[in-house]
Amino acid sequence: MSKIEIKDLEKQQRQGEELDLDILLPWIESQGLDLKGTPAITQFSGGASNWTYRLKFDNRDIILRRAPLGKKAGGAHNMPREYHLQKKLKPHYAYVPEMIAVCEDEEVLGSTFYLMDRLEGMIPRKNLPKEVSWNKDLTQALCYSFWDKMIELHQVDYLKEGLDTLGKGEGYVERQITGWNKRYADAKTWNVPAGRKVMKWLEENMPKEENLCIIHNDFRLDNVVLDANDPAHIIGVLDWELAAIGDPLMDLGSSLAYWVHEDDNFFIKSMRRQPSNADGMIKRDEVIQYYAQKTGRSIDDFRFYRVYGLFRLAGIAQQIYYRYSKGFTKNKAFKNFWMISVYLIKTCQNVMKQKA
């Protein structure tokens, strides 16, 4: 099989979001980068956060990631942090793309940005890449490879490797619960539940012992790059904006909130954005068992981490809907996001009632 280029979400630059080459190219030259020719530029249409571009020079294929225009929430869209985190992590986690340069001067393009090498391969989006003849065995091999990459990240010894500056560390669990409780409350609209019972339950059920490691915080199949010649082999992990030093089981719980089964109900399946439903993908309970087996960690009660992941996702959906309800975005795709919040809060309550 010949190599397949990632073109599933590449389009012409959106109007008003074009890169100014008259400014960008001199900056690139000032960094001592030997990039030849005028690049062919496309923009990735996926994602709702940072803007991502492909710049294909005569001698090198690179990616530019920058923050969007407009007012930004504190700590969000921090391109220098994402760049330096990946650069520090790369020697210890091979799946991080190669960083090239970072610009912390917002005057250059109107925001901070960084450059990295483009990984040539395939990204599983809502469905598995159609260029491959998938069967159950191949899909299952990809599934285990995917979770192995999370486990491998969690096993990086950040203290020994001097990576402890990548996050605040101690107190992570409490910060997350306090933070997401406040974010959901601040974004509440009249048509969604207050979620107070869920918030109180999370506050009262925080694990007494805190385990810390490097976590990705957005570990999904649509954030990995597959080898086009060996689709079960993952060559890259993308989108490190939310990475931190935090609790590994909270990372797992956040990922499982997006992990949709083929036999889930219609509403859950309508939220699916990765091919976790494909024949050969293992179920959520099996993922937890696999994680425990591979890490040697005893997981007797996963309810806290499951509820956290679902409530966090409810908070994300509600923040998006709040912006839509206030007219800050006109994207009609967000019109019914309040229903997601309602459903996820109810699901949290159901999980809370389950026996350990």
Image: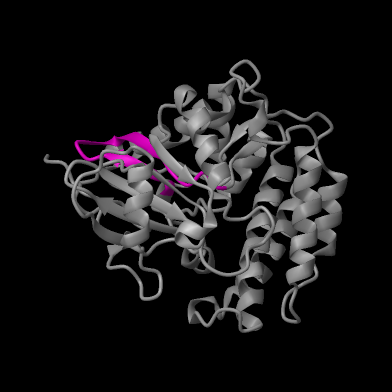
Quadrant of the rendered image containing residue 225: top left
- Which residue is at a point 68% across and 71% down the rendered structure image? 342
For residue 246, side relative to residue 265 (left or right): right
SS assignment for the magenta stretch, majority: strand
Q: Position of residue 256 (x, y in %)?
A: 56, 47
For residue 98, side relative to residue 261 (left or right): left
Q: Position of residue 250 (x, y in %)?
A: 66, 41
- Look at the image and tell me whether residue 64 can be seen: yes
Q: Is residue 35 magenta?
A: no
User: Over which residues does the magenta segment extend?
Assistant: 223-241
Q: Position of residue 11 (x, y in %)?
A: 28, 66
- Which residue is at a point 46% across and 28% down the rendered structure image? 90
| Whether residue 248 is situated above or below residue 352 in the rendered picture | above
Circle count: 0
Nearer to the camera, 29 or 319: 29
Quadrant of the rendered image containing residue 16: bottom left
- Which residue is at a point 56% across and 81% down the rendered structure image? 335
| Whether residue 12 is situated above or below residue 329 in the rendered picture | above
In the displayed orientation, state which residue is furthest to the top.
Answer: 160
- Which residue is at a point 54% across and 43% down the rendered structure image? 82
Quarter of the figure that contains the C terminus: top right
Nearer to the camera, 68 or 11: 68
- Look at the image and tell me whether residue 9 can be seen: no
Q: Position of residue 97 (x, y in %)?
A: 39, 36
| Whether residue 342 is situated above or below residue 351 in the rendered picture | below
